[in-house]
Each structure stands twice: as structure tokens, then as C-alpha cells.
Amino acid sequence: MISSLASLADRNFIAGFLLPVILALVCFLFVFQDVSPLGALWTKLTDAQGLEAITLVLLAMWAAALLLSLLNSLLYRTLQGYIGPLAGSSSPRQKQKQRDWRERSLALNVQFTAAEPTAHGSKERLDYLASNRQFIRDYPPYKQVLPTRFGNVIRASEMYSLQTYGVDSIAAWVRLVGIIPADYRASIDNARADMDFFVNIMVLSLLVGTMSLLAVLAVLVSCAFVNCYDFFGFPFWRRLISAVVLGLTACFAYEAAIDRARAWGEIVRGGFDLYLPDLAKQLGYDMPPTLAERREFWGALNGLFLDWTAVHPERWPPAKNDSPNPK
């Protein structure tokens, strides 16, 4: 219980969830300060003596941040394209991303063909390697392509361990995280909090910006029925400008979230590179000597992780007595 409460005051919760909520609420109150109840609250918040109102608002923001953290998985699945309006293997967005994958793959093949006859270290080879690195970080294999750029960057990171070692990342990660040292886990958590920050900024900017835009549209619609001269005051222009600024903020935050997803994915891939042998040892085995045997070994463990299929211990070398890396 105490540890759970402490996690709601750590750096990652504050940076990933509480700070976006604070920024969104301040923006919302600023945009709608001419609405009676919100105007009174805005006045109290900007008044140095409004301690009671500030306290209540802080508690409300903390609760909203907690709710946002509970909705985190749903938001990620929506932004990745697993659920929601972008989901579906036959959706236009999905087909567009598959076309993008094919075009970039063909361009890489052309680039590779041009670079192959050149010397090692030539500009052509270096350009090809840089393009290929960018491609494999931005896209998973073709059949795993998702409808959004954000989803594809994360999915590419998730597919790394399966392509490289033959181990399913989702099933193995919940076990691997138990033996990763605390300092490396902190690096992963910090990178995830940075990504959470921009994801939440994007979502909340869209929410407040949409409300501002709807208020603007309501004024424009009302002009068809009554004299609207009095409607075009400072509140109207404040909401219109806020809708535009928040829309641009959401676009910037989405690009930043993709960039942070790449950084997070790099650390996660490093976790598999560094600690998969320790996971095998923790499960009672040493890593087989050859690549083919290792892929077969992790395939057997995939069956254990995913399908509860027993692993025959006599098939694989038992772990030596030396202990894995300390936590």
C-alpha cells in the first residue's frame, strides 16, 4: 500500500501524467475564463490568497492524472492502431502504411544494389546502412505493419527479440524485467515516462482544442439566427487562437512521442541483448553454443511462456552454478 502511494509521487508519474494534466487544466481555464464558474476559479487560482481553491484544484488534478495513468494502455492501443477508428487490416490507413513499407523496402533494395560494388566505408555503403537502420527502427516486418507511425515504431521494437533471437518479446519481457538490474530498469522507466508525457500532451491538447473549436463553431452557427456582432469579442478570438495553437501543439507532441518511442525502444532492445542469457540461467539453462540451437531453445521457451507447453530439460544444457547479474 505504502509503495503504491509512493509511486504516485515519483518522477515518472509527475512527468508522464501529472504535469500534462496541470498544463491542460491551466489552458482550459484560461480559454474558458469568461464562463461564470470557471472564471471564478481562474480568478482564485491567479490570486495569491486563493489557497483553498488551489488546494482543491491540485487534488482534482492529482485524481485526473491517476485516471489518465489507468487509461494509459487504452490510449496507447488507440494511437498504435490496434483499436479505435484507425484499426482494421483493411482500413485505408493500414493499406497506406503497407504501401509506404513496400516503397521504402524497394528504395532500400535499389540503394543496396548501388552500394554493393563499392568499397567498404564508401559514401554509398554508409548511406545505405543509415537508411536501413532508420527503416528497421520505424517499421516492423510487413505482416506486422500497423496503421500509425507511432504504432510501427513501437511494434518494430517489440519484434526485435523475435527476429534476432527467436524469443517472443511480450511473453519474455514480464520475466526478463525481474532480473534486469535496478539502474537499467530506471533507464527504461524514465524513457517510458518521457514518451508518456508527449502522448498525454497530445491527447489533452486535442481534447481542450476540440472544446475550444466547438465553442467557436457554436458562435458561428448562432450568427445564422441572431445578430452576432456582440459575439465576436475577445473570448471568441481567444478560443479560436487557442484551438489553432493546441492543434499545432498536438502535432508537435505526436512527433516528439515518436522520437521518444525510438529512444525507449533502443533501451528495450538493449535489455534483451544484455540480459537474455541471465534469463535462461534463471530458468535453469545455459545458452546453447550455436545460433540455430539458440533459436530452437527460445522457441521451446516461447511454447512455455505462451502455450504452457512443458520444456524437456534433458534437451538443453543445465545452468552452471555461477549466479546471474545482481539485481
Image: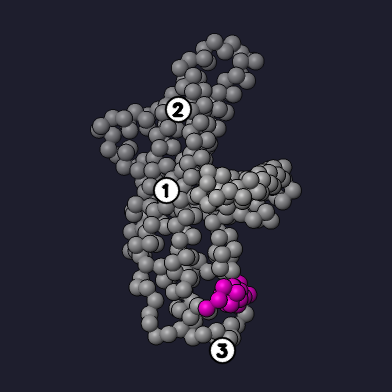
Circle on res. 275: none
**For residue 184, side relative to residue 310 (left or right):** left
Mark 3 burial class by Cα count in 10 Å: few <14, some 14-19, many 20+: few
Closer to the observer: label 2 or label 3? 3
Range of residues picked out in magenta: 289-308
Residue 281: image x %, image y %? 45, 79
Q: What residue type is labelled 1?
A: Asp
Residue 108: image x %, image y %? 63, 47
Q: Nearer the viewer, residue 176 or 204?
A: 176
Task: Say whether disc 3 or disc 1 marks the residue closer to the N-terminus.
Answer: 1
Q: Mark 3 points at which residue?
A: 314
Q: Which of 150 and 139 is in front in this view?
A: 139
Q: Is mark 3 on a helix, strand or loop?
A: helix
Q: Main secondary structure of the magenta part?
A: helix
Residue 190 visible: yes
Q: Mark 2 points at which residue?
A: 31
Residue that appears at 48% across and 15% down: 233
Mark 2 burial class by Cα count in 10 Å: few <14, some 14-19, many 20+: many
Residue that appears at 45% across and 63% down: 271
Residue 309 sits in quarter: bottom right
**For residue 80, side relative to residue 261 (left or right):** right
Q: Does the magenta stretch include residue 76?
A: no
